[in-house]
Image (tube, helix red, strand yellow):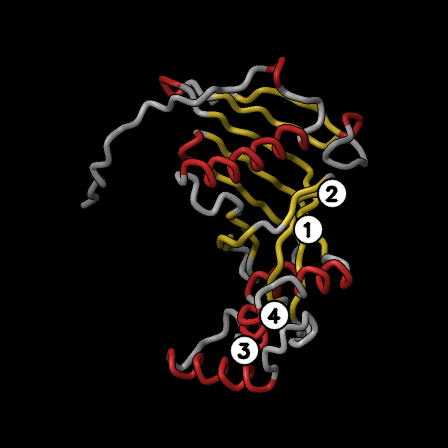
């Protein structure tokens, strides 16, 4: 027997998006939406974690696996995130770089989807970002064998304490070295889709598909079309 959740239906009251408002390459729109989400959270507080991005990979059995991480940046080359390279997603991307990801802002009736492949970030990019993290977060990167089984919470706390004593907080960005297993991925998209909610479920969906080499801001690399909602 199935049970509905009984959630109240909401008629989406988004602004939508017309072809006239859509750029020939996806980056200007996606970047503007992301910046608006960050700004709205600061002003209204109704877009929690505006840079949270759901990342889907494929496991060894060919099954999809999805989790939510923080998007640390978005530029013409694509969105990127940092992670433990020995984590489940790291092992899966090493075996199959195919990846899909989505940004979702329910209160703004907007979403963005990326599909393509993941590429490792350059080590200098990883190091530069790692140095900006709070000391405690840098320590956690050493203490946690991400995605591996843990005996209990106490064992995690003990591992953190051991690393904290090994790398005391001196206030210097190099007080905690970058772990060898810590890195990041950039999503090099072959398609980018935006969704803008409208009344009566007649939503706007615009899709940019790659037609040749080029970044997310290169109009010669993309073909745009509208999808039915």
* Mark 2 and mark 1 residues within 8 Å of each other at the beta carbon: yes
Within 10 angstroms of label 4, few (less than 14), some, or many (20 or more) residues? some
* Mark 1 and mark 3 residues within 8 Å of each other at the beta carbon: no
Label 3, label 4: how many angstroms apart (C-alpha)? 13 Å
Q: Residue at x 57, y 61 (%)?
A: 89
50 horizontally vs 85: left or right = left
Q: Nearer the viewer, mark 3 or mark 2?
A: 3
Q: Secondary structure at mark 1?
A: strand
Sequence-wise, the earlier of marks 1 and 3 is 3
Q: Classify 124 as above or below 164.
A: above
Label 1, label 4: how many angstroms apart (C-alpha)? 16 Å
Q: Nearer the viewer, mark 1 or mark 3?
A: 3
118 horizontally vs 35: left or right = right
Sequence-wise, the earlier of marks 3 and 4 is 4
The residue carrying mark 2 is: 77
Sequence-wise, the earlier of marks 1 and 4 is 4
The residue carrying mark 3 is: 143
Q: Is residue 180 visible?
A: no
Sequence-wise, the earlier of marks 3 and 2 is 2
Q: Secondary structure at mark 2?
A: loop
Q: Nearer the viewer, mark 4 or mark 2?
A: 2
Q: Secondary structure at mark 4?
A: loop
Q: Horizontal and vertical percent for residue 101?
A: 56, 45
Sequence-wise, the earlier of marks 4 and 2 is 2
The residue carrying mark 4 is: 86
Label 2, label 1: how many angstroms apart (C-alpha)? 8 Å
The residue carrying mark 1 is: 186
């Amino acid at each position: 027997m199935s049970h509905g959740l009984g959630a109240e239906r909401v008629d989406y009251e988004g602004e939508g998006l017309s072809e006239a408002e859509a750029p020939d390459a996806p980056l200007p729109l996606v970047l503007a939406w992301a910046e608006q989400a960050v700004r709205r959270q600061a002003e209204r507080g109704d877009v929690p974690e505006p840079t949270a991005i759901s990342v889907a990979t494929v496991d060894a059995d060919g099954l999809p696996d999805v989790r939510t991480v923080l998007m640390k940046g978005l530029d013409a080359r694509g969105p990127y995130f940092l992670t433990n390279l020995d984590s489940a997603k790291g092992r899966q991307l090493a075996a199959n770089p195919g990846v899909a990801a989505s940004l979702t802002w329910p209160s703004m009736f907007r979403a963005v989807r990326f599909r393509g492949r993941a590429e490792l970030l350059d080590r200098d990019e990883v190091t530069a970002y790692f140095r900006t993290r709070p000391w405690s977060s840098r320590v956690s990167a050493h203490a946690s064998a991400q995605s591996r089984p843990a005996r209990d919470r106490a064992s995690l706390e003990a591992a953190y304490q051991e690393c904290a004593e090994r790398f005391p907080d001196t206030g210097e960005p190099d007080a905690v070295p970058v772990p060898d297993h810590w890195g990041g991925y950039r999503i090099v998209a072959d398609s980018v889709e935006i969704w803008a909610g409208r009344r009566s479920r007649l939503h706007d969906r615009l899709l940019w598909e790659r037609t040749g080499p080029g970044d997310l801001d290169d109009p010669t690399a993309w073909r745009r079309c509208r999808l039915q909602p």
